[in-house]
Image (cartoon, rainbow, N blue to C red):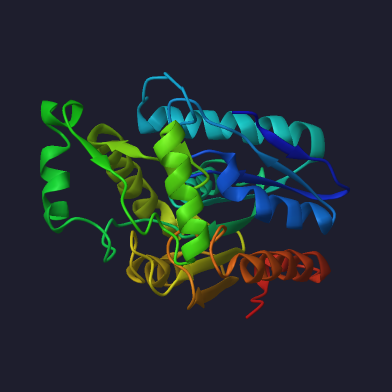
């Protein structure tokens, strides 16, 4: 899977795909941001993401953070301080970068952030996952993705299902999610939740009202606990978890562009709320 890089003349943006996902999840958003003038980087993170015929072994969540910071450093070295964003666990990684590298991250784009696995589409035994995860059993079990694949749009859902059947992966992520990956995600979520009050960058929170992976508990927590004085939250009514692929994808891109435009126009964006 190739990284995506669109060079522009405005503030650079680093977008991170979801767990066992790939840059295709964010290609539409990346192109819209680039059309607005931004340099946009959407890297593939091996050992965290997955693509067709990828045999890379899953690595620990600390390594996910290290890879994300390396990609941020490369972007900042060439283009200057960047907006950090992502979808699902990719948004969690963006939050960790904002906490750990405050001089390199100037704002946050948080799409379908997942700080709890508590959506309506998860299996009824999900409450057992944090208990089983720390045991060796995490290496023995895999959860298979099933409809709706994070997508409310029926045509897009059919396309994703065909991709998964043929290649084992899709624009919405991999067909199979190892329990070990879920365990590492839980570990990352705990670190992110703990650090929220120390994060000062302006943040845009984008979430679906019917997100089947992460309920509205996550965006509510972000809005309440982020240390930034500039937090803007949008809840979309016509999509599921994969906001960047679903019915509201154009609105997600539009709101993201508008948010960054408003930040650019503000003399002291970190001290102002754009809501």
Residue 176 in which image quadrant: top left
State the residue at coordinates (44%, 52%): 88
Do we see residue 200 in this rendering? no
Image quarter of residue 104: top right
**Measured from the top left, where is residue 157 in percent x and y?**
46, 57
Residue 188, given in percent of the width and then of the height, sits at 35, 42
Residue 193: x, y in percent?
35, 55
Residue found 66% across the figure and 55% down from its top: 29
Q: Nearer the viewer, residue 56 or 130?
A: 56
Residue 91 visible in the snapshot? yes
Residue depicted at 72% across the width and 35% down the height: 75
Location of residue 97 with respect to 117 vertically, above or below: above
* 33 and 186: which is toward the camera: 33
Work out which quarter of the rendered image holds the N terminus and state it.
top right
Residue 260: horizontal and vertical position, in percent? Answer: 73, 64
Q: Residue at x 17, y 37 (%)?
A: 133
Q: What is the quadrant of the C terminus in the image?
A: bottom right
- In this picture, residue 127 sits left or right of residue 49: left
Counting labels gives: 0
Q: Is residue 182 above or below residue 271?
A: above
Seen from the viewer's position, the closer of residues 29 and 227 is 29
* Nearer-the-camera pick, 42 or 21: 21
* Left or right placement of residue 150 versus residue 36 in this view: left
Question: Is residue 74 left or right of 172 when viewed as pictured?
Answer: right
Q: Is residue 251 above or below residue 182?
A: below
């Amino acid at each position: 899977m190739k990284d995506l890089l669109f060079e522009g003349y405005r503030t650079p943006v680093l977008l991170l795909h979801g767990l066992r996902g790939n840059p295709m999840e964010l290609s539409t958003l990346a192109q819209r941001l680039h059309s607005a003038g931004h340099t946009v980087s959407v890297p593939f993170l091996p050992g965290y993401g997955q693509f067709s015929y990828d045999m890379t072994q899953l690595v620990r969540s600390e390594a996910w953070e290290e890879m994300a910071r390396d990609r941020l450093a490369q972007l900042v070295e060439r283009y200057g301080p960047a907006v950090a964003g992502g979808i699902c666990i990719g948004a969690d990684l963006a939050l960790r970068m904002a906490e750990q590298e405050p001089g390199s991250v100037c704002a946050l784009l948080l799409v379908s952030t997942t700080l709890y696995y508590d959506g309506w589409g998860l299996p009824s035994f999900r409450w057992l996952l944090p208990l089983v995860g720390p045991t060796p059993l995490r290496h023995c079990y895999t959860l298979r993705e099933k409809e709706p694949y994070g997508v409310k749009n029926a045509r897009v859902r059919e396309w994703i299902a065909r991709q998964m059947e043929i290649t084992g992966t899709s624009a919405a992520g991999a067909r199979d999610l190892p329990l070990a990956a879920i365990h590492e995600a839980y570990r990352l979520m705990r670190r992110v939740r703990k650090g929220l009050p120390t994060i000062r960058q302006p943040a845009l929170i984008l979430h679906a009202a019917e997100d089947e992976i992460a309920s509205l508990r996550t965006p509510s927590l972000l809005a309440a606990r982020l240390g930034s004085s500039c937090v803007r939250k949008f809840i979309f009514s016509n999509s599921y978890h994969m906001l960047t692929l679903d019915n509201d994808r154009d609105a997600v891109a539009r709101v993201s562009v508008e948010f960054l435009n408003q930040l650019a126009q503000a003399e002291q964006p970190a001290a102002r709320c754009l809501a």
